[in-house]
Image: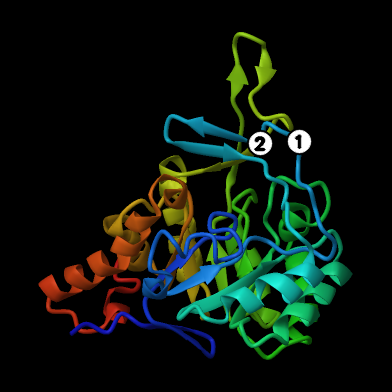
Amino acid sequence: MVDISVSIGSLTLKNPVLTASGTFGYGTEYSELIDVAKLGGIITKTITGKPRKGNPMPRLAETPAGMLNSIGLANVGVDAFVAEKLPALETLDTSVIVNIAGSTVDEYVDVAEKVQGHVRTNAIEINVSCPNVDHGGQALGSTCKGVEEVTKKVRKTTKKPIIVKLTPNVTDIVPVARAAQDAGADAVSLINTLQGMAIDIQTGQPVIARGIAGLSGPAVKPVALAKVYQVAREVKIPVIGIGGIMNWEDAVEFIMAGAAAVEVGTLNFIDPARTLSISRGIEEFCQSRGIIRVEALRGIAF
C-alpha cells in the first residue's frame, strides 16, 4: 500500500488531488456525476461579501490549448453561502476548502469570519489573484505588501489552515510567496490564470466581452510548473500546484517540482471522472517505483 495522504497545516488530505476554485461549483453540483469522496478535497467557487452577478457575457471561450474565462467571481454572497451552500456539504466525505475574495481587505476579513465558524469549512483559500475583477484580486495580490496585509488580517480571524492563491502576473513570484508565509499562511497555491485574449476576425472584436481574460489549461502548464519549482525551493510551507493538469503524469511532474498537492481545474469542464483517476495514477506510479509515501516524490527535481 502507498500512503498518498498529505498535510496542509493541520489539515490532512486523503490524497493530493483537489478541485480548483471556479471549476467545481459550490461542491455539490458534481456529486451525481462522480464519487466526490475519492477526491483529496474540493475547493468552492470564490465567495465574496455581497452577491455578484459577474462579468457580462460572453465570458468563456475555448482556445487551441485551453480556455479563456472572465466569470468575474459570480457567487451568491457569503450570507447565502453559509446558510444554504455549506450545510449541503455536510454529508460529503472529503475536505472542503472555501475560497474567498473581496474588493477590500476588510471584505476578505468579513467573509473569512463568517465562513470559518462552520464545521464544514476545513480550510480557507484566499484568492488574491483573480485577473477578472477591477478591485481586490490580482490588484491586491501583485505586491508583497498587499498579500502580507490581507493574510495577516485573515489569520487573526481563524485557527483553520489558510492557503494563499497567488497570481503569475508579477515580475517575481517568490517574494510574494514569502510574504504570504511570513504573514501566517499555512500554504500557497499557484498559479492562477495567465492574462490572455482572443479576437473574432469576422467582427474585429474580442471574443470575451471584457476583452482580456484568464487563460487556463495545458497551455499554461510549463509556466505553472516553473513557478511552483521556483517557490517550493524558497519557502518552508507547502506549495499547491495549479495549471494545466490533465492527467496523473502532469500531477507527478508538479509533485516532483515541489508541490505537496495539486488543484485540477479545466479538466473538470471536459470530464470530471478523469480528475478522479489522477490520484489512482499517482498511487500506481509510486507502487511501480517501490515508493511507500507520496511525500518521497516531493521536490526530487531540485
Instruction: Please name the residue shown 43% across and 29% down the image.
Output: 64
Percent across and percent down for residue 61 are: 56, 32
- Per the model, the C-alpha gap separating discs 2 and 1 is 7 Å
Callout 1, which amino acid?
Pro
Residue 133 in the image: above or below residue 276: above
Residue 199 appears in which quarter of the rendering?
top right
Instruction: Please name the residue shown 76% across and 46% down the image.
Output: 54
Callout 2, which amino acid?
Arg
Q: Which residue is tagged 2?
A: 59
Tell me the crowding category of disc 2: few under 14, some 14 to 19, or many 20 or more residues within 10 angstroms, Cα based: many
Q: Are marks 2 and 1 in contact (CB under 8 Å)?
A: yes
Residue 116 in the image: above or below residue 60: below
State which quarter of the image contains the N terminus.
Answer: bottom left
Q: How many marks?
A: 2
Residue 137 appears in which quarter of the rendering?
bottom right
292 sits left or right of 86 in the view: left
Q: Which mark is residue 113?
A: none
Residue 255 in the image: above or below residue 33: below
Q: Quick one: 101 or 78, which is closer to the camera? A: 78
237 sits left or right of 273 in the view: right
Tell me the crowding category of disc 1: few under 14, some 14 to 19, or many 20 or more residues within 10 angstroms, Cα based: few
Instruction: Please name the residue shown 54% across and 54% down the image.
Output: 23
Q: Which residue is tagged 1?
A: 56
Q: Is residue 267 visible?
A: yes
Residue farthest top in this picture? 202
Q: Is residue 145 visible?
A: no
Residue 3 appears in which quarter of the rendering?
bottom left
